[in-house]
Structures are given as C-alpha cells and as structure tokens.
Amino acid sequence: MTGTVPTDPLTAELLAVAEEAARAAAELLHRGRPADLGVAATKSSPVDVVTEMDLASEKLVQELIAARRPEDGYLGEEGTDRPGRSGVRWVVDPLDGTVNYLYGLPSWGVSVAAELDGEAVVGVVAVPARGELFRAVRGGGADLDGRPLAVRPAPSPGQALVATGFNYVRSERAHQAEVLLALMPEVRDIRRAGGGAPPAAPPPAPPADGDLAVAAVPGVFEPLQARLEALGAWHG
C-alpha cells in the first residue's frame, strides 16, 4: 500500500499494529457472527446495545496490542481503560455500528487509533462487509485500500450532502430530530448510516461533505457549525 506514508519509525510501527488489529477483529466479526446473535448488555439506554461479538472483538484487539506493545495504554469502547508508560495510548471501537451488525446491515467496522502524548497519530478502519480498509497518518495522508484519499472541493452549503447520527437517549434524540427538520431544507440531502467510522453511504469514499458531529471540509464546516449553533444543536 502506498497511499499513506508514515513519518517516522514509531509511526510506521503503530500503523502496522493498528492495521493488524483491525484486520484480525474484522475477520473475527465477519466470519464468526452467530446466526442467533442477540443483545448481551446495554449502555446509555435500552437501545444502546452491546453484543457478545463486541466483547470478543475488544478482547482480541486488546490482547494483540498488549502482545505487540505491552507498555502502551488502552481505551476501549466497551469499558477497558488501562494506563500505559510509553506515551502511546490506543483508542479502539471494536465494533462501530453494533445495531447494524445485529441486524445484518453492512455499515459497521472496526476502528483502531493510536495517540502519542495525547495527539492522534494513526488510525485504521476496517469495513469487512465491503472489503474496505481505511488508513490515516498525521502528516502522512490517508488511503482506502492503498488509493490516496483527498478532501474534495467544498460545495456551497445548499449543495452539501450531510451525514449524521442520533443519540441513544430518547430526550436527546427528540431534540436532534427538531434540529434535523430545520436543517433539511438548507442542504442537498442528509444520510444516516448508524456507524461513526464507516462511510455514511455506498462507495466511493468519502461520500459526505459534512457530519453533524461536526466534521466537514473547509468552506462547509464554518457555515454548518454556525447554523447548528443557532439551532441549539449542542444544547439539547
């Protein structure tokens, strides 16, 4: 793969470990999904679910990283928070898009990132249902299956395709729906995939110009952020 270029030996090592972990967990989830998969636990609300495969994937990633880099810290979506001594901390969502996975929908993935002294330096997202692997290095670019990715020219806000998601808490979801209703006539369209890292629509990636998180290309970010602020998007 040539699209992403590590900037130093440590970054190269972290990227290799992140890719190995993401691929291994993605293979486990893709090949090992039980036909009778059900909910093992809930988190912030009754619809914020965890399955046995979330837990199995996190265990695999945590053990792999610990074997490769035992001095590193680890922060996992399913509750693991282990301090380290190396200055490196791994931040992992072992199954991003759990509800999609539970229902057999393809927009889910494994997200593995590494921070150095509190700054994200590498990230990998594996989306096995689509056979995709995204990689990024701070200062070294990003790629999809080895093909370099670049930010597209910014459209006007009215021509922007915006991706979003919703909170699992009912009161927050109701407020977010009100914001969405007001925003809908002001943009090209809105998509919701149900996973934070996997792209919000079918390939090619990246498909969306903005996200209500907010993440967007320059020229879309500023007016979108200002409009959401005016709509009270952060104050539900």
Image (spheres, rainbow, N blue to C red):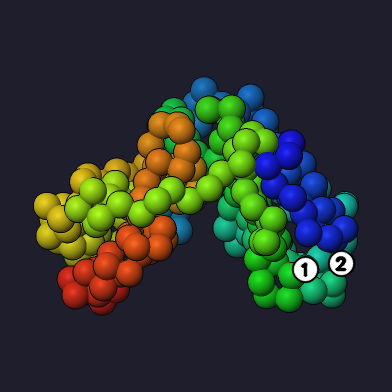
Q: Nearer the viewer, residue 78 or 174?
A: 174
Residue under the image location 37 percent in, 46 percent down: 208
| Mark 1–mark 2 CB contact (< 8 Å) | yes
Tell whether 42 sits left or right of 65: left
Element at label 2: loop
Q: Is residue 43 left or right of residue 20?
A: left
Residue 217 seen in render: yes
**For the view shown, which residue lies furthest in the front direction?**
153
Tell me residue 199's x, y (percent). 45, 42
Q: Amino acid at mark 1?
A: Val
Mark 1 vs mark 2, CA separation in Å: 8 Å
Horizontal and vertical percent for residue 104?
44, 28
- Position of 167 with respect to 50 (left or right) is left
Front: mark 1 or 2? 1
- Do we see residue 110 in this rendering? no
Q: Residues within 10 Å of mark 2 (few under 14, many from 20)?
A: some
Q: Quadrant of the C terminus?
A: bottom left
In the rendered view, tell whether residue 74 sits above or below residue 62: below
Q: Is residue 27 above or below residue 181?
A: above
Q: Residue at x 56, y 36 (%)?
A: 127
Place of residue 97 in the rendered image (x, y in percent of width and height, measured from the top left): 46, 44
Judged from the image, the secondary structure of the residue bearing numbered disc 1 is strand
Instruction: Specify the quadrant that holds the N terminus.
Output: top right
| Disc sitting over residue 71 in the figure | 2
Residue at which label 1 appears: 88
Q: Which residue type does callout 2 highlight? A: Glu
Q: Nearer the viewer, residue 5 or 46?
A: 5
In which quarter of the view is residue 31 placed?
A: top right
Q: Residue at point 40% right, 59% down?
A: 216
Left or right placement of residue 12 versus residue 107 in this view: right
